Image (cartoon, grey):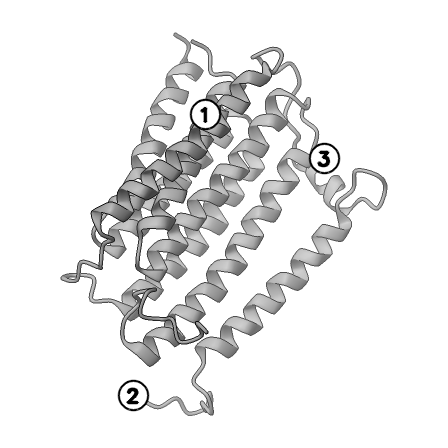
Amino acid sequence: MTLETFAFWILAAYTLFASYFVVTARNLFRCAVGLAGTLIGVAGLYLLMEATFLSSIQIAVYVGGVVVLVVFAVLMVEDVTQKEFLRSPLSRCLLASVVAELLLAVVGLTMLSQGFGPNRPTFASADVREIGRALLSTQAGGFVLPFEVISLVLIAALVGAITVAGKPGDDYEKPEED
Amino acid sequence: MHPGLEHYLILSALIFSFGVYGMLTRRNLVAMLLCVELVLNAAALNFVAFHRFLFKGDAAGTVFPILIIAVAAAEAAVALAIVIALFRHRRNLDVRAADTLKG
């Protein structure tokens, strides 16, 4: 058993446990912590596949940005120390687990029936230089249009979030307590 | 056993189905958002696995996860703004109570 194999199984078990924690934890704050664990585990799997740049983006944007945002929102809207939020009835849980297992079976069987060639990578992963060139290339295989569109999406999301979360008629110069 | 493409695909399928299960059972808006993030991560993991094992390190396999991460960040920002606005009006986040727009 090589070190890579060992690392894969440890990371896989950790990621699965953390994502299970996200769907079952009774407390919203613990859910967010579980999500952070899942994201870190997936970042480790990216490292294992030599996608180093993507791994660092995952940590910086997801764990450092999205999860922190979620935690802030949770702290603003819930009393995390006591409240256990509503759970679905057992029948709905059973139905949902059947649906999820069916999806898993379909996806898994489709993937396994394909027989994807060799199991060991023979080429190096794309490094930062290649990713940067691909992102800004206007030739075939370039991604300059998605890159520009995603920047528009981010701007629109930021402005929209401020508009939706701000109080109507709110004066941002002199915020008042409610 | 050396981890190959199938291992990563099965792992991501498992994370995906966890996310789907959570989306169907959770009744809290923030918890549903967290489950959506799980699903998005499973998709990104698939992209990187194919990039690594099947497509010879073509940069497209890492560009798409970057786009996925950006979309997830935008989605989280908008969804949490809606959560805060909803909480301001209703004082709770149960999705079944928030059906005012239903016809």
Q: Which mark is residue A94?
A: none
Q: Mark 3 and 2 residues: CB-CB less than 8 Å, in contact?
A: no
Secondary structure under tag 2 reads loop
Give neighbour class at mark 2: few <14, some 14-19, many 20+ (Cα, 10 Å).
few
Please give left or right for residue A4 compared with residue A88 in the image. Answer: right
Q: Amino acid at mark 2?
A: Asp
Instruction: Give the mark, 3 or 2, whose residue is nearer the N terminus.
Output: 3
Secondary structure under badge 1? Answer: helix
Instruction: Name the residue beneath numbered marker 1.
Output: B10
Name the residue that disc number 3 marks. A130
Q: Residues within 10 Å of mark 3 (few under 14, many from 20)?
A: some
Q: Which circle, 1 or 3, is nearer the viewer?
A: 1
- Amino acid type at circle 1 is Ile
Quarter placement of the N terminus of chain A: top left
Residue A165's place in the image compared with A82, above or below, is below
Of all chains, the one bearing label 1 is: B
The answer to whether residue A51 of the structure is visible from this angle is no
Q: How far, Cα to Cα, is label 2 from label 1?
A: 49 Å
Which of A115/B96 is in front? Answer: B96
Residue at (66% x, 18% y) in the render:
A123
In percent of width and height, residue A137 lies at 80, 44
Marks 2, 1 in one chain: no
Visible residue check, residue B95: yes
The residue where tag 2 is placed is A178
